[in-house]
Amino acid sequence: MVSDAETIWTVSTTAENRTATVAEALGGICPVCNQSAKKRCSGCNTVYYCCVEHQRQDWKNHKNVCHPFKICSDEHFGRYLMATKDIKAGATILKEAPLVYGPSQITAPVCVGCLQALTEKQFLECDRCGWPVCKRKCQDRPSHQAECQFTIARGSKMSLQHFYVPHPVYQCVTPLRCLLLADTDSTKWQTLIKLESHEEQRRGSKQWRDDREGVAKLIPRFFKCENKWSEDEILRVTGILQVNGHEIPLTDPPSVAIYSNASMAEHCCTPNLAKTFTSKREIVFWAPNAIQSGERLSICYSDVLWGTPNRLDHLQQTKLFRCSCARCSDPTEFGTYFSALKCSGFKKESNCNGLLLPENVKNWHSNWVCNKCQGVVVFKEISTILERARVDIGAMEKTSEKHCNMFISHYSTWLGPNHYYLVEVKILLSQIIGGGSPDAIKEISDDNLMNKMKMCQDLIRLFEKICPAEARIIGTTRFELHAALAEFARRGVESGGPAVRSALEDSLYNAKECVRMLTNECDEMPESHICEQARINVKSLMVLLGLQET
């Protein structure tokens, strides 16, 4: 991306532009002088300039739209983003401030200023409107002013009595902030109202009925504004919020925000973009791996570490579509068998080492069939095991090494070795073993150390197949592997064992990869602190290995 201080040209002979069309080869029109131009902005690869000076002159206008992608559209996918140039690994694709943000629709009371959780004994009331805040300065935050003035206009202050369960009136806060953009910022309002709401698909569904009662009817009644918006207008904005909202993990509980360009990124269960946020709630899309010009840019609207049936159900319920990406179309999930169960777990008399998957890939509630013996297991039996595992994960002590090992030992009877429930617990276990304090890893047994190393290596191989852009989980797992390898090397030095340098080099590689994967995390995220420690460790390992920084 071009800065005020520098201008970078991308000419038509570079490798980046191998696929240029005839029109591109001939050039374009300079937006400053309207004359023909053949040199392109290297940030977006779409705008032409006739000279350096004109590019500098236009930067103030161009910088807000200078992205390495363009917005495309077709009948099947709607609007989506396509790369306009080859994108290098690590490059930032988009950094964008929210159109609007606020509390999640279902939430216990939070401060309407900073959106952090409140308790019954630790909150203040906004002097003007009565909405709860955690400290006095939060009542003056710009984000709160719209509902503050609207609450004052109703003639009576907000009075909150309950703090321990989701509060009904909080369902209205963020939809109300969206609606009030029409009065406070018409430009943002026009952008927001053009986003997809799936009005017709939503109409009549349980979510639509809940929104009608809990939002569309409550806003006019509670705020005494019966004639300001129609029920359909409120429901449309609520739909836009649910379809396009991004959960922001910077607060506890998470909040939600809507963005303009970010809402155009299409969904894929193996996305090529990583997503994070700045402390100002700006959304950041970046490329953990190289992306070629012409590729569609995607994020995951669900959780990439959920199994296919869970992702499909979640997307159908929240985004109102059935995913047909390459991963969802392949029941083996690229040969990982991430959602598969063991045939032998259901047929005790059998020694079959096959794995079970649904006989109909479009219906995960159908009977399941073994890929070796072709034996059939009815879905009810599959469902029983999966539900038991789900409940047990929810109830287990997630910081207990013993509980994690017990879960893995018990459910390995039925779940495939890469099953998403086992993977969830292995991620926890990889962090628990040798975790808790800087020197804790020195106290674990050799067997436990080797177990941690193998577990991290297996997890990373799995992640690279099903979610190679999932930067946070890959980065944190790389850190755990780096720490285990460094300890393995330390023990090798003490015992005079071989392969010490190799272990240190592997440790350094994983520490560097951790930094690469987590470098975009802001200070409010725990991964940022892991990244900082990894940076420190990289320097120490470079000294140990006698290497120079490049």
Image (spheres, rainbow, N blue to C red):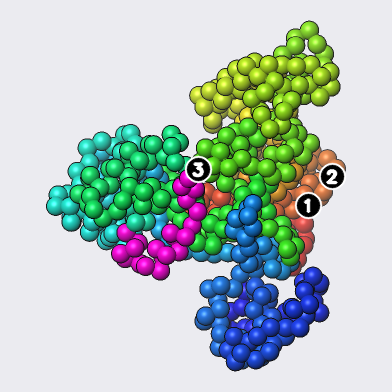
Please, what is the three-letter code of the amino acid marked with disc 3?
Answer: Gln
Q: Amino acid at mark 2?
A: Ala
Closer to the chain start, of discs 1 and 3, is: 3
Which residue is at a point 18% across and 56% down the rendered structure image?
153
Residue 159, image x and y in percent? 19, 43
On screen, residue 420 versus residue 529, left or right, reads right
Residue 87 seen from this side: yes
Q: Residues within 10 Å of mark 3 (few under 14, many from 20)?
A: few
For mark 3, what is the residue? 201
User: Main SS of the magenta segment?
Assistant: helix
The residue drawn where x is 75% and y is 9% is: 348
- Which quadrant would the N terminus be assigned to in this image? bottom right
Query: Which of the labelled discs sits on residue 505, or is there none?
Result: 1
The tag earlier along the polypeptide, 2 or 3, is 3
Q: Amino acid at mark 1?
A: Glu
Residue at which label 2 appears: 499
Q: CA distance from mark 2 to mark 1?
A: 10 Å
